[in-house]
Image (cartoon, rainbow, N blue to C red):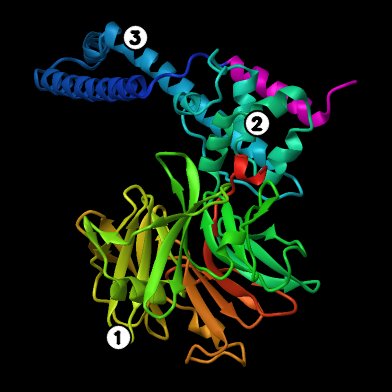
Amino acid sequence: MGSSPAAAAVEELTRLYRELPRRPSAEEVEAAAAAVLASEAEAEGAAARLARAEAAAAEGGVSGELLDLLREARANAVLPAIGLLRRRKEAEIVMEVERRFKVFDGLLARASRVAEAGEERVDSAPAESVEEDVRRTPRGFTGGLDDEMVLCEILVRLPARSVLRCRAVCTAWRRLTSDPAFLRAHHHRQRDLPLIYFRRGGSDRVGAIDLHAAQLRPVVDHTWPPLGYTVIASCDGLLLLSSGRFYICNPATNHWAEIPQLVDADFLGLYPHNPSGEYRVLYGEFHGEEECVYHILTLGSDEPRCITMTMGSETVEQPLAREFLMHARGDRSVLVRGNLHWYLRHRDGGCKIMVFDTASESFQWMRHPAIPGWVSLLEMDSTLVFSAVECTTRIDLWVLQDYERSTWACKHRIELPMAQIRQFPECNLEHLGWSAMVVSVEGDVLVRCSNRILHCDRKGNVLASFQFDGQLPMNCLHRLKENLVVHPFFQM
């Protein structure tokens, strides 16, 4: 059976890639650039010396023809030395090799997009250096720039759905795309996409908006679980859904599992426990009017573990333990640096950040800036951020610059597209009929207006518009970064 056109194209790209010479290191490129600059400086110095010599000869009364002879002789005498010219030529070759590798970096990224014709668009950013990619390449790919490394370079950029389809091409592709190191590298390269709710065809849907590609990707579009589910947590490509019953799912692999222990409990957070590699759920329960208890459930286990709420080495008294559970159960936890965070709003108008250290399983308070307006605590680029709506036309974005010292800074003042919002009759300046959510540390905003979601930059420019039929779309406040890693708790 002959190879497909796509496979033949990959083979040709592989052959051309292997014919390139060894890629110079960063130090070699830097030294080559310095050598070229030194050669240029020497050439400028030689030209200056020649000009001075000609001026001196002219002042001495040398005749025209003799002056031309002297000029040519002096030019050959004061030009850069042969050794310097040789070093410049070698430096230019090094820089040309690096240029060609950068061209191939771009071609690899373009090849992944071409392979995705009719599918989702993928990251078109230039590839990193081959040396960096070797460190993230699956075991067994240490023999240089071979076929499998080039395939890895292409396949690791594809969205999860396409990687799963590529596994059906041949055994070698299936082995490559199933390797744990490849799966980790693939997850690392995926974009962290904001999620939204919408309805289509009588069923609830969850979609992800790719800001770079201006595209809506399907995430959860099944009629099961039952209608009315909400996303209550997201972590490493996993979603925790609630519809009266609780489910953990991986949309990339279409794996689902029910978590019956959370029924009638107050969910607090989902997190990876890095020391053990497990995924765990923190939740609480009220026992009567005087007592509450906290539990940790390892996904895949039937038995939760009861923990005592502590702050440092001190046990928290029941009044504070109950107060925290009362406020945190209706709010969304934010996972940053392996810890869970809650922004707690009290009836007296005061606000605090509570932190759960998932390694020590203890709680502590964190300072936060005094920010006026309606505030939301978010995670972006592995950093805690606050978005604060103080007026109807602007959102302030505060970023935690120093986690240990709780140092915050206002990074952006984001203008909202009020002219576009006013075009919808059901939307007005009092936030009736529309809402806005910051979705990147660069200040990108998703604005819901009627049955549309507008993607705007921080200056209020509309970059893309998404229209939905049926029920109004809603911002989800959670994000998804696709992950093809297979977890054992889905197989129990």
Tell me the distance, in whole angstroms, between the alpha carbons under discs 3 and 1.
74 Å
Tag shown at residue 178: 2
For the residues bearing labels 3 and 2, Cβ distance under 8 angstroms: no
Q: Which residue is mark 3?
A: 86
x and y percentages locating residue 301 in the rendered image:
56, 48
Q: Amino acid at mark 1?
A: Gly
460, 386: nearer the viewer: 386
Image mark count: 3
Q: Quadrant of the C terminus?
A: top right
Q: Secondary structure at mark 2?
A: helix
Q: Secondary structure at mark 1?
A: loop
In the image, 153: left or right of 89? right
415, 448: nearer the viewer: 448
* Span of residues in magenta: 1-19
Q: Residue at x 26, y 70 (%)?
A: 317
Q: Residue at x 48, y 91 (%)?
A: 429
Q: Check disc 3: other Cα within 10 Å, few if <14, some if 14-19, many if 20+.
A: few
Q: Residue at x 31, y 72 (%)?
A: 318
x and y percentages locating residue 36 in the rendered image:
31, 22
| Label located before the other in sequence (2 or 1) | 2
Compared with 266, 88 (above or below) is above
Foreground mark, 3 or 2?
A: 2
Foreground mark, 2 or 1?
A: 1
On whether residue 13 falls in the magenta region, the answer is: yes
Q: Amino acid at mark 2?
A: Ser
